[in-house]
Image: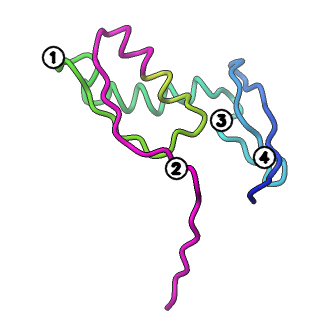
Amino acid sequence: MKNIKKERYTTGDGSPTLYLPALNEYYHSHHGAVQEANYVYIKNGLYFHGGLTGSMESITVFEVGLGTGLNAFLTALEAQKQKKKIIVIGKIVTKRRRINNKH
C-alpha cells in the first residue's frame, strides 16, 4: 500500500479530491469535496454547538491527520469570516504503524 497509485479527481462541485484506482476509493465524496467538508466538518462540527457564532473569542479544534488539508482550510476561512480565533491541537500522521493483535 505504500506506493499505491493516486489520481486527482474533480468532484461534482468542481473541487478536487484524490482517487485510488486499486481500491476504487475516493478521499472525499465524488459528489463534492467542498460540499461534503462544509456539511460534515463546518455545519455539523464547528457550528453545531455555536462554536463560531457564540460569544467565545476562540474555539479549539482537535485534528488527527491533516489529510488533504481541506477541513483545516475551510475552518480558517470560516473563522476569518466570523472574526474568531481558531486554536488547532493535534498531530499530523506521517507514518503508519502496524499493530499485531495477539489473542
Q: Name the residue under label 2.
A: 93
Badge 2 crowding class, 10 Å Cα cut-off, few under 14, some 14 to 19, many 20 or more, is: few
Q: Is residue 92 magenta?
A: yes
Q: The magenta stretch spans which residues?
A: 76-103
Badge 3 crowding class, 10 Å Cα cut-off, few under 14, some 14 to 19, many 20 or more, is: some
Q: Which amino acid does label 3 sit on?
A: Ser
| Outermost residue, front side | 94
Whole-angstrom CA distance, mark 3 to mark 1, is 33 Å
Res 55 label: 1
Res 20 label: 4
User: Which one is closest to the eye, mark 2 or mark 4?
Assistant: 2
Question: Which tag, 2 or 4, sits closer to the chain's start?
Answer: 4
Rendering coords of residue 99 (x, y %): 54, 74
Question: Which tag, 1 or 2, sits closer to the chain's start?
Answer: 1
Q: Do the residues labelled 3 and 2 touch (CB within 8 Å)?
A: no
Q: Which amino acid does label 1 sit on?
A: Ser
